[in-house]
Image (cartoon, rainbow, N blue to C red):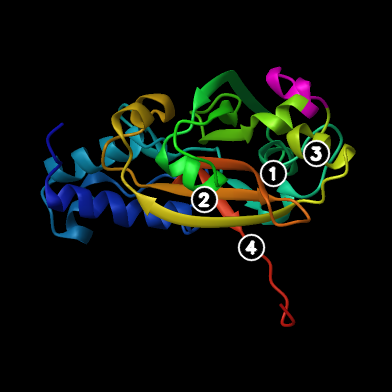
């Protein structure tokens, strides 16, 4: 895919920042093409291309004869604590989405696979070890997916909790099932940013130039043994990560 002109990309990035950071509210109209061309020192064809890229990213809707309007959907606000607490039948993404008044969805596939090098290293097992893989695509109704989340679990854990092979693992999901058999889980998460791979572009419905956050989370038991690893790929402008700290931490 050819790279967009640098000027159009710069305008897209500037407008995206204004939308994501709340300077432009949902439903607000962007300035006209003529006004944007004057503001950014560009011709109208460049502005038009930037607006198309904003629409491809899902940030605006282009209204023929009217202009570009900020989409009503807001990023899902994800608190780090949502993974540790159960609200009703849910943890994690579903808790965050419902807290924002949205209706979440998850599409899950479950299979047994051989651990590749990145997963094996994080799980602390040899490369090629058989593990259970739970791959999920998550989002909110009426909008493109927000993230993919893939979890790998040691088979000795699965033998103790056979329901992990099912799409529906019951209220609270994997972590509630681990707690039920006596595990006390401590989480460790790292976050980086990169451009999406082709398969991620297709699944998440984003362009090649739209950055994604990549998160690796390890779940360790009370003996500091890794029992599960999760890799999330998150569309940055569809998901806000919130971390809360105390001065005594």
Task: Assess disc 3: are there few (<14), some (14-19) or many (≥20) residues with their C-alpha within 10 Å of its C-alpha.
Answer: some
Q: Earlier in the sequence, mark 2 or mark 4?
A: 2
Secondary structure state at the residue bearing disc 4: loop
Q: Earlier in the sequence, mark 1 or mark 3?
A: 1
Residue 33 painted magenta = no
Which mark is drawn over residue 178? Answer: 3
Q: Earlier in the sequence, mark 4 or mark 3?
A: 3
Quadrant in the picture for residue 73 = top right
Instruction: Return the residue at label 4.
Output: 243
Distance between mark 1 and mark 4 Cα atoms:
13 Å
Distance between mark 3 and mark 2 Cα atoms:
42 Å
Q: Earlier in the sequence, mark 1 or mark 2?
A: 2
Q: Position of residue 107 (x, y in %)?
A: 59, 21
**Outermost residue toward the bottom in this view:** 247
- Look at the numbered discs 4 and 3 and tell me whether their residues touch, using CB distance below 8 Å: no
Q: Is residue 23 above or below residue 183?
A: below
Closer to viewer: mark 2 or mark 4:
4
């Amino acid at each position: 895919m050819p790279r967009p002109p640098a000027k159009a990309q710069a305008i897209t990035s500037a407008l995206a920042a204004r939308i994501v950071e709340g300077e432009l509210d949902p439903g607000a109209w962007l300035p006209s093409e003529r006004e944007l061309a004057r503001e950014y020192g560009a011709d109208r064809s460049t502005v038009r291309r930037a607006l198309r890229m904003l629409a491809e990213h899902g940030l605006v809707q282009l209204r023929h004869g009217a202009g570009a309007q900020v989409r009503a959907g807001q990023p899902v606000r994800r608190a780090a604590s949502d993974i540790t607490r159960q609200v009703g039948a849910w943890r994690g993404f579903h808790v965050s989405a419902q807290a924002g008044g949205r209706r979440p969805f998850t599409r899950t596939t479950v299979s047994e696979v051989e651990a590749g090098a990145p997963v094996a290293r994080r799980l602390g097992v040899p490369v090629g070890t058989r593990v259970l893989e739970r791959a999920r695509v998550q989002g909110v109704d009426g909008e493109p997916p927000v993230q993919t989340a893939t979890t790998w679990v040691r088979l000795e854990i699965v033998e103790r909790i056979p329901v992990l092979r099912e799409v529906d693992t019951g209220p609270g999901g994997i972590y509630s099932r681990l707690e039920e058999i006596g595990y006390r889980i401590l989480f460790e998460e790292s976050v980086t940013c990169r451009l999406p791979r082709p398969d991620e572009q297709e699944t998440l419905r984003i362009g090649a130039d739209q950055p994604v956050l990549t998160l690796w989370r390890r779940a360790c038991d009370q003996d500091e043994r890794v029992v599960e690893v999760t890799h999330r790929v998150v569309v940055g402008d569809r998901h806000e990560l919130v971390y809360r700290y105390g001065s005594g931490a």
